[in-house]
Amino acid sequence: MANVKASQMYIWEGKDGNGKRVKGEISGQSEALVKAILRRQKINPTKVKKKPKPLFGSGKSKVVAKDICIWSRQLATMMSSGVPLVQSFEITGRGHENAGMQSLILAIKGDVEAGNNLADALKKHPLHFNSLYCNLIEAGEHAGILEAILHKLATYLEKTEALKSKIKSALFYPAAVVVAAIIVITILMIFVIPQFSSLFGSFGADLPGLTQFLIDASNFFVAWWWLVFGILGGTVFGLLEFKKRSIAMQHFLDRAVLKVPVIGDLMEKSAIARFARTLETMFAAGTPLVEAMTSVAGATGNIVFHDATMKMKDEISTGTQLQASMRETGLFPNMVVQMVAIGEESGAIDTMLGKVADWYEQEVDDAVEALTSLLEPMIMAFLGVVIGGIVVGMYLPIFKMGAVV
């Protein structure tokens, strides 16, 4: 299959139908294609050249999921207001503060102006638009309900991003405290304890066991700090890479996370919320159940739920009801299975899935608050024991000398 040439920005000048000089920027795959696009817009191009890249970075350029979420809502709102699709790209692209997102939007605009469907233009950027997004847009274009699909997509992405944000906020605090603790302990080991060690060397007496252990640990750390951090960094990097490349490792870690107290409950509720929200969105867009399950599996965020969803897909394709295949996995609570069963019987399965998603998103909120309130005293106690132990160990010899005097 031939490679598609990437779109790039061009600066152009020309004359419009009234002979007035005009100029601007446009995205295209070649200079000839850009000229053809301009002529279709009744502009006679006199000068077209590639836009030079800035010598220095112009601020933020990385496109993240939040950017796609905001842009989807903007596009849906503009289409609801009667703004043509290409003009919506122009408005949202030119006004975007993220240079990377601006280039992405204008590249899509150029492809659409060249005659491609929006879904085909989005498929050229798989890093930013997954199969679920592209498939829903394609379904919306074929059915003539693109505006409605964009609104559903925007709502779905907003809720998904909100869910991710809540989980990240729950895990950020303990991670930040652990990093701060490592920095404090490193400073104590490298700069503070050696000062006490030189002072204690003049005492000429045996040191308490805890003090001697800390001094020995400090001496080792000063001499081999690069090895310690190398082993820690290598271990973390190795585990992450191993997880990416090993299905068995992914299974092990994702299953292990689900069994961790409190955190496992949070991850399970998050996976169920994503499952229900994604399936609701696909159903509402008219996507057949079997086709929807692949996108749903990828959205769950946990390989255990991913594999279970793909197994459900196989069972559904042979005639099994959704609620029966969900119950067979053993991963979904009875309440979820019962609501899906009611939805199947009443023909309102998307409505029931929406209610399940709303419920579990609220459950994630409550779990995040519970996790934060539980971890805070545990972390404080851990820091108190570790750092307090170091301080006490360093002052033990001084206390003993005071007792003797």
Image (cartoon, helix red, strand yellow):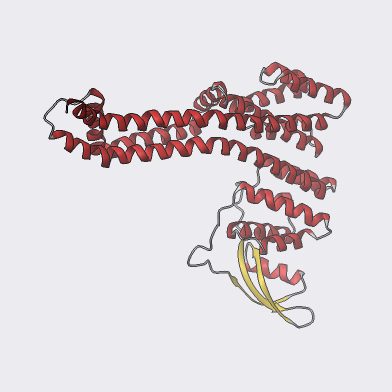
Residue 295 rendering spot, x and y as whole percentages: 69, 35
Residue in view at x 30 percent, y 30 percent: 392
Say whether residue 376 is visible: yes
Q: Is residue 5 left or right of residue 316?
A: left
Give whichever of 289, 278 is nearer the camera: 278
The residue depicted at 79 percent of the width and 35 percent of the height is 283
Is 303 placed left or right of 392 in the picture?
Answer: right
Task: Where is residue 29? Give x, y as percent.
Answer: 63, 62
Q: Nearer the viewer, residue 374 or 87?
A: 374
Image quarter hosting the C terminus: top left
Please identify the residue farthest to the front as the structure is shown: 405
* Residue 188 versus residue 401 in the image, above or below: below
- The percent coordinates of residue 171 (x first, y second) are 54, 35
Residue 15 versus residue 291 in the image, above or below:
below
For the point 75% across and 20% down, which residue is it?
Answer: 335
Quick check: can you spot residue 318?
A: no
Which of 5/156 is in front?
156
Q: Residue furthest bottom?
A: 19
Q: Is residue 300 left or right of residue 61?
A: right
Q: Name the one closer to the observer, 104 or 218.
A: 218
Residue 331 at x, y = what percent? 66, 20
Instruction: Name the image quarter holding residue 9.
Output: bottom right
